[in-house]
């Protein structure tokens, strides 16, 4: 999510390292950056330190111990909070923009986001289609900005309707019982074959 913000605010040229792989392949040029992830999904701290970044921006999923270790190595590290609602996204974008000297672009991105949200709310359908969010065998239930986005657009989030909170592994039985009319998959992610 932090890398995506950097691309959205036009600061991608300042990114020297990031997780490189299927989760970030949709960001143009991401494959040209140094991969800072190990095969098991943990941060390769030695690579991060060797890059000598001015600031390390990390998402909420990064373990606090990793953040402490990077700070102990003399790096400035900002760990983004977990965005649980759409309202928190513009604040996170603005904060990242301040860290990288892109305040104006971050503000414009946040304004555009809020305007899009208002337009979506105004044009949401009267009937709520059943919607399933799918991302590498995970889904988003209640208490997630993805779940809120589905509902804001007029959809019935089948994961939330099934009592799922947060991001959770996809349960095939939930899918079969809830019978989604739409399956939403982020760009670059695979569509489930089952």
Image (tube, rainbow, N blue to C red):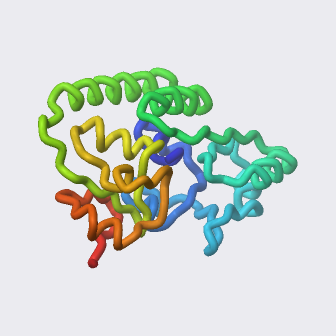
Question: Going 49% across and 47% down the picture, which residue do you hit?
Answer: 1
In what quadrant of the picture does the C terminus appear? bottom left
As drawn, 9 above or below 72: above
Would residue 124 appear left or right of 58 to someone viewing this image? left
Residue 183 placement: quadrant? bottom left
Residue 28 in sight here? no
Q: Residue at x 62, y 31 (%)?
A: 99
Q: How many marks on residues?
A: 0
Residue reaching furthest to the right: 72
124 and 172: which is toward the camera? 172
The percent position of residue 53, horizontal first and vertical second, equals 69, 46
Please identify the quarter of the rendering in which residue 87 is found.
Answer: top left
Q: Nearer the viewer, residue 178 or 44?
A: 178
- Residue found at x 55% / y 47%: 15
Judge from the rendering whether residue 132 lies leftward or rightward of residue 139; answer left or right: left
Q: Nearer the viewer, residue 178 or 94?
A: 178
Q: Residue furthest left?
A: 126
Location of residue 140 in the rendering, given as x and y in whole percent from the top left corner:
42, 53
User: Image height check: is 101 above or below 182?
Assistant: above
Determine whether, in the image, residue 113 is placed left or right of residue 44: left
x and y percent of residue 181 in the render? Answer: 17, 58
Q: Name, please, the residue furthest toward the bottom.
A: 194
Q: Position of residue 33 (x, y in %)?
A: 54, 58
Q: Is residue 29 visible?
A: yes
Q: Residue at x 61, y 38 (%)?
A: 81
């Amino acid at each position: 999510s932090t890398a995506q913000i950097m691309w959205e605010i036009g600061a991608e040229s300042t990114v020297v390292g990031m997780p490189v792989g299927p989760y970030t392949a949709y960001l143009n040029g991401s494959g040209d950056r140094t991969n800072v992830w190990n095969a098991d999904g943990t941060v390769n701290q030695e690579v991060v330190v060797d890059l000598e970044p001015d600031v390390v921006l990390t998402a909420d999923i990064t373990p606090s111990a990793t953040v402490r270790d990077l700070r102990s190595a003399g790096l400035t590290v900002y760990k983004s909070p977990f965005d649980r609602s759409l309202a928190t996204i513009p604040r996170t974008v603005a904060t990242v923009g301040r860290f990288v000297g892109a305040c104006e672009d971050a503000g414009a991105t946040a304004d555009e986001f809020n305007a899009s949200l208002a337009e979506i709310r105004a044009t949401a359908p009267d009937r709520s289609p059943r919607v399933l969010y799918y991302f590498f065998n995970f889904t988003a239930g209640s208490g997630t900005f993805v779940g809120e986005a589905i509902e804001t657009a007029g959809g019935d989030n089948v994961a939330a309707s099934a009592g799922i909170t947060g991001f959770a592994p996809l349960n095939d039985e939930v899918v079969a019982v809830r019978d989604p009319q739409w399956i939403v998959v982020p760009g670059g992610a695979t569509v489930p074959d089952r």
